[in-house]
Image (cartoon, rainbow, N blue to C red):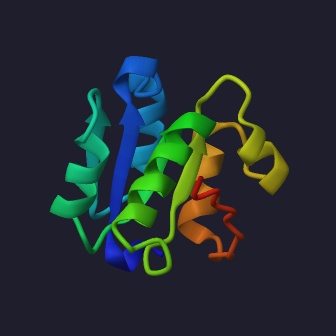
C-alpha cells in the first residue's frame, strides 16, 4: 500500500495521538507519511481533501474509524480509498474482530506489509 503515501489521522481531543505510538507508527511507515491530528468538526474532511492520493490511516478507536469512513462515504471516495487502522482506542472492537494487532508498531507493520480486504458497510439513511 505504501506507494500511494499515508495520511495518518488521530483524534487529538480523544488522546489518540500519543507521541510514542505516533513515533512507532511513523518509524514503520517509512517514506511518505503525513500526520493530521483532528480536533474540530471538518478537520477530517479537510485533511482528506488536501491529500486525495494518500491512504488514510486511523490512529485511534472505533469512533475515529467511523468518522473517517463517514467522511469518505460522504465524499464518494470510500470505494477508491482504503482505510488503515492502528488501534489506540479503549475497546478497539473493530481491530479485535479483524485480527489487527493492538500494539501500534505491529499494527503499522501489518498495514505496511499486508493486503487490502473489502468490508461491507451498512448505512441507515433514516
Task: Answer left or right for 17 relative to 91.
Answer: left
Foreground of the two, 26 or 11: 11
Nearer the observer, 102 or 38:
38
In the image, residue 82 lies at what x, y percent? 50, 70
Taking 101 as reference, is 7 above or below it? below
Tell me if residue 103 comes above or below residue 39 in the rendering. below
Give percent across and percent down for residue 97. Answer: 83, 50
Residue ranking furthest to the front: 126
Q: Is residue 102 left or right of residue 54?
A: right
Task: Identify the residue at image location x=67%, y=37%.
Answer: 103
Seen in the picture, residue 64 relative to 71 is either above or below; the reply is above
Q: Is residue 80 in view from this perspective?
A: yes
Point 37% across, 49% down: residue? 8
What is the quadrant of residue 62 in the picture?
top right
**Residue 21, relative to residue 14: is it above or below?**
below
Residue 102, position as x, y percentages in the image: 71, 38
Q: From the top left corner, tell me how far across and down residue 46 is, in percent.
A: 20, 51
Amino acid at each position: 500500500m505504501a506507494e500511494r503515501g499515508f495520511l495518518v489521522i488521530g483524534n487529538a481531543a480523544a488522546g489518540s495521538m500519543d507521541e510514542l505510538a505516533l513515533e512507532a507508527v511513523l518509524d514503520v511507515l517509512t517514506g511518505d507519511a503525513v500526520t493530521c491530528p483532528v480536533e474540530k468538526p471538518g478537520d477530517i474532511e479537510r485533511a482528506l481533501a488536501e491529500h486525495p492520493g494518500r491512504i488514510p490511516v486511523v490512529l485511534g478507536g472505533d469512533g475515529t474509524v467511523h468518522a473517517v469512513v463517514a467522511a469518505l462515504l460522504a465524499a464518494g471516495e470510500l470505494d477508491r480509498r482504503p482505510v488503515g487502522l492502528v488501534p489506540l482506542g479503549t475497546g478497539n472492537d473493530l481491530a479485535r474482530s479483524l485480527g489487527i494487532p493492538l500494539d501500534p508498531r505491529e499494527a503499522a507493520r501489518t498495514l505496511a506489509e499486508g493486503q487490502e480486504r473489502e468490508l461491507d458497510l451498512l448505512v441507515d439513511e433514516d
